[in-house]
Amino acid sequence: MVAFSSFLPSLLLLLLPSLQHHHPHHPQHHHPQQSFSSQHHPSPSPMHQQVGGLLIGNLGNNTGNGSHSSPPIQHAGAEDTVHWQQQIVKYTACRQASAPHYRARAAAIAGRMSNNNKSAISITDPNRPSSTKPNGFHKKDNSISGQTSDSDDGSGTPLGRPGSALSHPSALASPVVVSSDASNQQPWSGLDLGGIHLKTLSPSLFAFSHVTSLYINHNSLTTLPAAISLLRKLTVLDATGNQLRAIPPELGMITTLKELLLFDNQISDLPPELGTLYQLDVLGIAGNPLPESLRLILEKDGTQALIAYLRDSCPVPLPPPDREWATVEADNGLSPETAPESFTILCYNILCEWYAPGATYPYTPGWALAWDYRKELILQEVMGCGADFICLQEVDEEQYNDTFLANLSKEGYEGAFFPKTRARTMASEEKKHVDGCATFWKASKYNLVEKRVVEFNQVALQRPDMRKSDDMFNRVMSRDNIAVVCLFENATSGTRLIVANLHLEWNPSFRDVKLVQIAMLMEEVEKIAGHFAKYPPALLGPDRTPGPSYSDATKVPLIVCGDFNSIPESGVYEFLSSGSAPKDHEDFMDHLYGSYTTDGLSHKLNLKSAYASIGELNMTNFVPIFKGAIDYIWYTQNSLAVTSLLGDVDPAYLSKVVGFPNAHFPSE
């Protein structure tokens, strides 16, 4: 939450783009903490050498291969299924990799065969990285995701059509481009500690956070430390042929895993927390005394079916503690003591039902993703805060009427809703499922004077300087985002307030469009505020006393809030906070937008982000591939002041969570 003081109202802002939580009643679950020795079994030759991009334990001769007696290969039944056949093929290959550093040696041989210009594979010190690329052993992939894209700028981010699952940030797509840090590049990405009689894993191992492949197979390990979850880039973990009796639930935090090979151990059960491994292609379980029910799921339907079963059967974890309030000292001379009025505002992207299929958030249990479950949590959060203004994004017409207005009206709220532009061309039944923005207010405290919708693509079409721009037609016109602008008067004092509730384009490939959209909104809001300032003052009380008057647009208090899909380093944030953006701003890229790219952008509204005085929230969007602030509440500094803010979600809780939505947070 956020609180303000002002020449008019003292403003309390509640920023909740999915950050409130529900505290379901459930039994408490604890996982025992384990300690591990950093001592390694002695190895006869030097450790930490590099072969073909793979760091290995040693390249000398061992007295043994570290393997132990293994049971015969299991068969699923009289007639093996395709999934079990694949399991056995992988099982056989892993058994054959029992010699010391088998993978590293295989990579070296492959490297020699593929490199005609070298007679040997160089071995380098990993602490002195070479500038040459590794020889093809799990080469590091710098892309955000492994999927192809129709993106016209080659960013690798899927564009998606408006209204589709891929037209929305999710586990599959980030709202901003996340580039890899070249300074952290390593010459090797695989680590082979296989077949060398290890009994424990050193804590220092988990400092290699860049590692994508870890081979600890055919050793004498009896446990895996929870700290293994620090290796958040792992795609392959092979722990075949050890003496493991259990798997740490923290392993479920490594959502990048594609192969988890646990063949030939003594594992009697799988922690349900592994259900978050939504990218896992192979879960190797043969050769373990696991329950028949788990093996049959994998046998019949494959790895992802078993992961889904674990995900949906996972117990609800303990909820986080309540978010703490931070008191803010006003920097413009306003304070709650001197302010005649105060109000609160809640901003919340609720995650529309149609943007949340299981495939889009595959780490979330099906029951927690279901709209019937999520809407109850959302209603509890929205109604529980008791805010004077509630600004929601991604609400469709049916949800607006049946879920929100139906319940909020009982608490004295009225509302205004507009869907995205595409609803114009749809039949009445279809348009009910088009999302938009909804604003609610306490009718006993504020009177709605006027409501307007700003359709960004329609505003662009009306600009003469953009009509000849191919970029306007090809990029801006194809995105149908909107803003809902409501004009209010205080029922008691007659003071005025404008609340703009918006949802900008999400796709990072269209960061130019985001900047164009916010520029158009500021122009429209300035016009609306100018007209509002000229309205005659409200007449108050029995004696019809005139309320306050406003000389121009900049004097009318203004809130601009919503889902901006833009980080603090973006052009959108820079423009709003500074009041300008140069004509050659990098977010325009090479696109042309009339006066915006010939003269630059400017506005006169003197805006400030509510959280700017203490630092933006660490995140308002939390999914496996992106964690950051993209939702904001902006206010006019000359007429409003923040007095308190609702802080971040507990970091300890977040460290154990893959992403939102989950059992406690119904939106991402």
Image: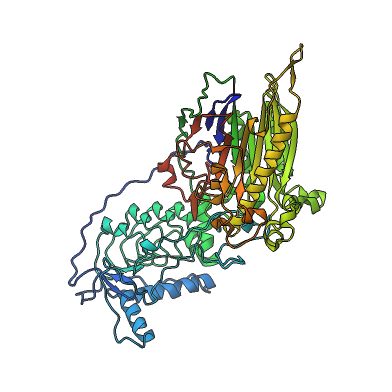
Q: Is residue 12 in sight in this rendering? A: yes
Q: How many marks?
A: 0
Q: In this rendering, is residue 76 above or below 639?
A: below
Q: Quadrant of residue 166?
A: bottom right
Is 531 or 643 nearer to us in this picture? 531
Q: In this rendering, is residue 528 above or below 51?
A: above
Please say which color scheme the image uses.
Answer: rainbow
Is 20 or 184 nearer to us in this picture? 184
Give the x, y percent position of residue 436.
Answer: 69, 45
Q: Viewed as shown, does residue 148 lie left or right of 48?
A: right
Q: In this rendering, is residue 393 above or below 321?
A: below
Q: In this rendering, is residue 86 above or below 385?
A: below
Q: Quadrant of residue 124?
A: bottom left
Is 581 or 211 nearer to us in this picture? 581
Residue at horizontal 20 percent and vertical 64 percent from the top? 41
Residue at horizontal 53 percent and vertical 33 percent from the top? 1
In the current view of this chain or complex, which residue is farthest to the top? 543
Q: Is residue 394 in sight in this rendering? A: no
Give the x, y percent position of residue 215.
Answer: 34, 67
Residue at horizontal 48 percent and vertical 29 percent from the top? 331
In the current view of this chain or complex, which residue is farthest to the front? 599
Give the x, y percent position of residue 354.
Answer: 67, 51
Give the x, y percent position of residue 443.
Answer: 71, 26
